[in-house]
Image (cartoon, rainbow, N blue to C red):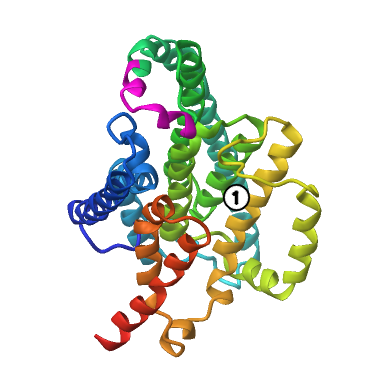
Amino acid sequence: YGMSKKSLLAYELRLLKYAVLGICINWSAWLLMGMDWKDNFFNVVFHIWFIFGIMLYALILYPLRIYLEKVREQSDSQGYILSSEIEQKPSQDDDSAKQTITVRRRAQDRDSWVWAIAVILGGVLALLVLFHVVVQPLLLLLAPLVLDFFKTLGTGVAFWGLPEDIDETYTFLLRICQYTNASITNIYLIVGCTKMFKRRQIAPWMVIANTYINRCLFYRAADERAFHGLDLTLIALSVYYLGLLHRRKLGEYLVRYWFCLIMIVIPIWPLGAYGRFDENPPTDVGMRIRYNSLEAIAILTWFLAADRVFDIKIFTEDKLDWMNDWALLAFLVHKAIHIMLPQPWNWIAIIALIPACYFRRHYT
């Protein structure tokens, strides 16, 4: 989203085109197999909800994207440290003046850091109080309306962890308040850190820390997947526009000592654990910390060293650009194929799309 040169409208229309195409493909599979699509249209859409999620994220975060573009333009004009002013250095002959300026500058830097941290933490606490004292009671008043809406979507809502009775709806709304609080706090951290710190590359680190501290300490059910996608988009946008402090040096060490990373992550995952933890999130605190710690490590590894791990020659020399076409096509049709074909023919059909994508890219 951040790398796209399209306007918001063009970006949304392109995603909508893929969403409509994917829904039509899934719908056709339901019709051909004689399945009851009328009472379960939520499941007809199925994985295409992911596209609608991206469209929603793009709309919600559009003002933030504009802000980050302006911050980056300002940063490029001021240099790497992104300082709003350049202090004049005293002459080398005047040692006493130099010492006086140095002491004064250190005191000013210390005071600015204290003030910045106080403002950031104060805002985080204020948002926490706002959502749990004011927003939460108001949100619970909407429980009957929320339940009626989900009932219209059919039985497929259970797969996504959405409520099916009034008690589940109250619990669902309490969790939604918690998820929203974490995401709004991430936005506040991005804006606040870019305002308060000279090195605005600190902001993505704060967002990553807030996201995964919340995920480790507080239970998140299967219904939080939409908010998780929003948080990941926020992290990606902040890293793309602001950079990640000390990314280059950390990336060098990560590539150099990659075997140490393997030795760290292997003991984190408990032997014998398996399954879809996005569908059935762990309620045990220890397991939740392990699971989310591994995800955080994977995300940091991607941001710190992906450009060093994946060679551009994969596309320029090995000509594997057709994989982009196959990945998009497989995403759109895989659910319909799984509905219509039994194993292993479903997987064979998906793999069989590869030659078509290859010949389309290189011979048409």
Query: Which residue position holds label 1?
Result: 104
User: Can you give x and y, in whole percent of width and height, for residue 237 in the image?
Assistant: 41, 53
**What's the residue at 66%, 32% (across, down)?**
217
User: Can you give x and y, in whole percent of width and height, for residue 361 in the image?
Assistant: 31, 81
In the rendered image, the vertical position of residue 74 relative to residue 293, given as above or below: below
**What's the residue at 34%, 57% (across, down)?**
332
Quadrant position of the N terminus in the picture: bottom left
Question: Over which residues does the magenta segment extend?
Answer: 148-160
- What predominant SS class does the magenta segment belong to? helix
Q: Residues within 10 Å of mark 1 (few under 14, many from 20)?
A: few
Task: Check residue 218 for magenta coloring.
Answer: no
Name which residue type carries label 1.
Arg
Q: Nearer the viewer, residue 118 or 150?
A: 150
Quadrant position of the C terminus in the picture: bottom left
Q: Nearer the viewer, residue 47 or 62?
A: 47
How many marks overall? 1
In the rendered image, the vertical position of residue 137 relative to residue 353, given as above or below: above
Q: Nearer the viewer, residue 38 or 282?
A: 38
**What's the residue at 45%, 11% (across, down)?**
166
Q: Nearer the viewer, residue 210 or 69?
A: 210
User: Can you give x and y, in whole percent of width and height, for residue 196 in the image?
Assistant: 48, 44
- Residue 103 seen by the camera: no
User: Can you give x and y, in whole percent of width and height, for residue 20 in the image?
Assistant: 23, 50
Single out the residue that lies furthest toward the bottom.
Answer: 317
In the rendered image, the vertical position of residue 142 relative to residue 156, given as above or below: above
Question: In the structure shown, which secondary structural element does the residue marked by tag 1 occupy?
Answer: helix
- Residue 274 seen by the camera: yes
